[in-house]
Image: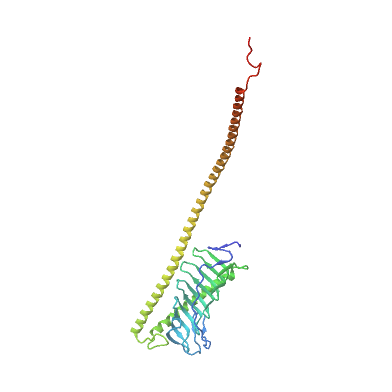
Amino acid sequence: MHEPRREGVEEAAKTSVHSPRPPIPSAIEEPNANATPNKKQDDGTMDVGDTPPLLVGMTTLADKSLYHGHLNADKLPHGHGCMYFHAGGHYAGQYVAGKRDGVGVYSFPDGSRYEGEFKRDQRDGHGVYMVPVGEKYRGRWQDNAQHGLGEWTEWNGAVVRGEFKKNDFVGPVESSMQSCMDSVNLASRTQQRAVVAERAARVVERLAYAQDNMSIDGVYIKDEATFESYSQDTTVRQRAYTIAWQREFERIETTTQDGKTEEATLGERQKQLHATIQVRRQELARYSMFWDIVADKERELADAKRVLASIETQVRLEEAVDQRTRSCVVSAPLLPGDGPSNT
């Protein structure tokens, strides 16, 4: 255990600390191996350069996710766009050949957000992950996990800084905290680029909505009435997705709470049974002591009865001997000279 530092907030130096809320896996789309990626600029925008001009439209993917934004010649997301996933959540940012690649903002169904770099649909590079309750991670990512130097902020303001591996806090940096702070600052700058890319994707999304007479394997937007109808349907679907997810979340929370209540009830019942067993043991101990006393008294009574019976037998024998002696004296004849003398 290392001595924690204090820089306005506490830096815990514990090891093997698991991040409380790691991001859930994101949806994955099939890439186009023949597509030519555009050049990503540092400000969150993309330079199309000499590549063929991008299409703008709306399309529905095989998993029923909805995409609005730039498309390449193969009708794959490519450039800036917004994806609304069928399972919940959405992404706004840069795409390359059908995959999230560059910088962008991913909003999860539970309200948490990741703002940072992506590589081939994975959170990879530097970025910031935020949870609605106030927890936040800033730092390095790899393969959708907090991996590298970074900073985790708890809901109560406590901060841990150091090295993370696959969403676990390993420990502080041995050499110095400067390299860790450099990674945190780079994550903050990348977050700003991701927000810029998100805004650019929203602009393209509105352009796709406003595109007249456009149909790319998806919704055909003919006029304002069609657009309004589609917008209302999209809102209804989003609400339905949100309500369904919220109900499932509440069901899980209720089940968990019921389990905790049952566990607490069983614990209290166990305590009561333990107390009852202790009382019964004490009663049995007293009964055992009483039985020992009774057994001793019964043995003493049996000995007394045997002594009394022996005495009674002895008395009867003596009485019989005495009786026989008396009988012999009365019945014996008088011999001459034994009678009374005549004077």
Quadrant containing the N terminus in the rendered view? bottom right
Residue at (47% x, 79% y) in the render? 93
Location of residue 241 with respect to 333 vertically, above or below:
below
Q: Nearer the viewer, residue 277 or 132?
A: 277
Location of residue 116 with respect to 342 vertically, above or below:
below
Residue 95 x, y percent position in the rendering:
49, 82
Residue reaching furthest to the front: 336
Residue 180 x, y percent position in the rendering:
58, 70
The reply, left or right, for residue 140 in relation to residue 199 is right
Total numbered circles: 0
Q: Nearer the viewer, residue 63 or 78?
A: 63
Location of residue 177 with respect to 30 vertically, above or below:
above
Q: Nearer the viewer, residue 277 or 219?
A: 277
Which color scheme is applied? rainbow
The reply, left or right, for residue 332 in relation to residue 34 is right
Residue 193 x, y percent position in the rendering:
49, 77
Residue reaching furthest to the top: 343
The reply, left or right, for residue 5 in relation to residue 214 is right
Residue reaching furthest to the right: 337
Corner quadrant of residue 332: top right
Q: Nearer the viewer, residue 180 or 338?
A: 338
Residue at (59% x, 71% y) in the render? 179
Corner quadrant of residue 14: bottom right
Location of residue 127 with respect to 319 vertically, above or below:
below
Quadrant containing the C terminus in the rendered view? top right
Residue 291 x, y percent position in the rendering:
55, 43
